[in-house]
Image (cartoon, rainbow, N blue to C red):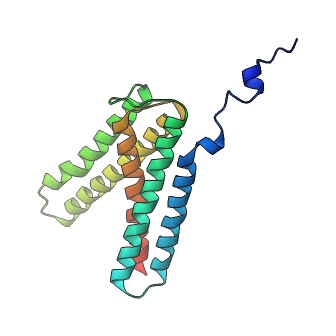
Amino acid sequence: MDATPTNLAAGHGNPSRRRAPWRRISGGLAVAGAALVVPVFFLGSDELRGLFYYLGFVSLGLALVVAVMGWVWGRGRSFTFLPRTRWGWSALGTFGLGLALTIVPSYVQTTTLAAGNAVNSVVRLGFFVMFLASVVGLWSVRSRAERSVGLVALALAVAVVVPYFLLAAVIEAH
């Protein structure tokens, strides 16, 4: 007698790639987003550059959202409101710390240039901490089976917005 169960031998244990339309949707959105961002470097009109850049950003952001949500749903998991893992709570707390480092310094009155530079450095640190929180959040979704809708949304928002601003700074420098 064969020790392999018939349903596993027939391939019933793993979902078919054909039943995962989110992969095609996410891939199509990513290709469309990249195709929309590339002309930004070659267009002369600022209005057209802004339009193409914005549409590419929206398409790439949607591609990331569809990919992560499809990945979670594809494994038969449902979403929850609050984080369920230690890493999920850590990512949420780190995001809160980064948000505080970004918002609180704007209420500090500075009178010297050195103090103003220190406040700007703290704000930059806050954005960096929020980006690290998004990396930890995405890692907790990927590796620790985190299913919190809020955490996934925050992580995706920060993970998409920071590269968007960095690319905008590179494009504006040209």
Judged left or right of residue 16, residue 1 is right
Q: Is residue 66 above or below residue 86?
A: below
- Tell me residue 69's x, y (percent): 46, 42
Count of numbered circles on the image: 0
Quadrant housing residue 28? bottom right
- Tell me residue 77's x, y (percent): 48, 29
Judged left or right of residue 174, residue 22 is right
Q: Is residue 63 above or below residue 140?
A: below
Write the residue at 17% across / 55% down. Answer: 106
Write the residue at 23% across / 56% down. Answer: 119
Which of these two is toward me, 103 or 42?
42
Write the residue at 37% across / 64% down. Answer: 165
Write the residue at 29% across / 41% down. Answer: 97
Which of these two is toward me, 40 or 29?
29
Judged left or right of residue 157, residue 140 is right
Q: Quadrant of the C terminus?
A: bottom left
Quadrant housing residue 47? bottom left
**Residue lying farthest to the top in this orientation:** 1
- Tell me residue 140's x, y (percent): 48, 34
- Tell me residue 128's x, y (percent): 38, 51
Q: Is residue 133 above or below residue 30?
A: above
Q: Quadrant of the N terminus?
A: top right
Which of these two is toward me, 142 or 21?
21
Which of these two is toward me, 142 or 99?
142
**Residue lying farthest to the right in this orientation:** 1
